Image (cartoon, grey):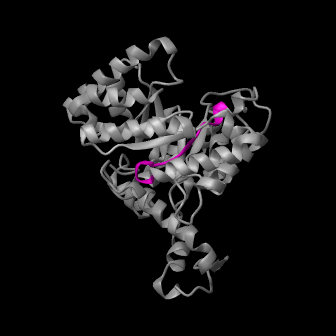
Amino acid sequence: MRHFGHVPADDRRRLFHREPAEFTRDAPAALLSAALGATLYSPATRPRLADDIVKQAALGVRSMVLCLEDSIADGEVTAGEANLVTQLTDLDARGAGTPLLFIRVRDAEQITDLVRRLGPAVRLLSGFVLPKFTPERGEPFLAALTAAESASGQRLFAMPVLESPELLHLETRAATLADIAAVVDKHRDRVLALRLGVTDFCSAYGLRRAADTTAYDVGIVANVIADVVNVLGRADGSGFTITGPVWEYFRLQERMFKPQLRSSPFLEGRVESLRTTLIEHDLDGLLREIELDRANGLLGKTCIHPSHVIPVHALSVVSHEEYLDARDILRPERGDGGVLRSAYTNKMNEVKPHRAWAERTLQRAEAFGVAREDVGFVELLAAGLGR
């Protein structure tokens, strides 16, 4: 699979200076964590789940979570497990291409039980999402994952979700973060990425952000995101990929504020109707939040609607300017540091302070590609949507 692989080859050559790399579920963890992109959640109870997975893969989805937790009612868990096993077994028999697939469980025992019940179809799985992850809950989850991996012979990753009240509350946050860091560090080879449960954060205070605000406009949420990145997202080798929070909206709501998308990029790209569509579906707020995610050290995003996927991927493509800067900073002859003028002659690149940024940028470039010099987000978005 590859990002934008659903776009015709001629269009990819027109759009990309360097195309996204192909990868499989057996790729190195560093590439997979960068390539998660928009991770689409789906309730495990969906009666045509196998068909849904194949359909979304054809539309550009490259990672999915099949959810047995908050997206289904407590009384649906047993039926959801049975449906999941049936649907994945069917999908395995078809031999169709799938995205990276993860199961979101409720408790540790489900991991070993589901892997046993899936039998050979476990080869479709890339791992499990571990909700409400705390130091106390984390160890049993990760022990179960280790046991399931050993029993099945299948490499299985964990994606813990950081969403507990202990993490949110100021008086317990520092200690909780330190303890979580110790747990995930011990299982570093198994932890693919850390996910943020911002809906649960808001719930603890009776909050819900509107369609024209972002997670970063909610002070309590912004503070905890910053602290999570501070402790768990460091670029010194101790950090992990941390993914962006879910965007809850996908239909037109009554607006209090003006749209956040400037018209000029869409006029220049001759796709004026695309801007209207994005605004009508409340996706201008999503685009702003994606940009703020990256500015705050997050990569990828939890998504609950297919319309969110391509915007996340289009904004994940490395620009031609970013690529040249990163490549110049990492040239071997720059190993001693120093300062150089950027290839676009519009900024200073300081080799030592910008090295970690450059390394992460080239990692993102491998997963999502590098746009041509004259190609921007609008063209990538239009191509991804088939326009």
Q: Is residue 186 left or right of residue 81?
A: right
Q: Which image quarter: residue 277? A: top right
Q: Residue furthest top?
A: 75
Give x and y (percent) for residue 344: 60, 77
Q: Which residues are magenta?
A: 188-200
Give x and y (percent) for residue 371: 48, 62
- Residue 277 in view here: no
Give x and y (percent) for residue 197: 60, 36
Q: Is residue 73 left or right of residue 57?
A: right
Give the answer, above or below, for where 267 lies relative to 57: below
Give the answer, above or below, for where 342 lies relative to 241: below
The mark total stands at 0
Going 64% across and 47% down the picture, which residue do you hit?
177
Going 24% across and 36% down the picture, which residue do you hit?
96
Give x and y (percent) for residue 123: 26, 38
Q: Which image quarter: residue 31? A: bottom left
- Residue 113 in view here: yes
Q: Nearer the viewer, residue 129 or 340?
A: 129
Does 248 appear in magenta? no
Does 198 appear in magenta? yes
Q: Nearer the viewer, residue 130 or 7?
A: 130
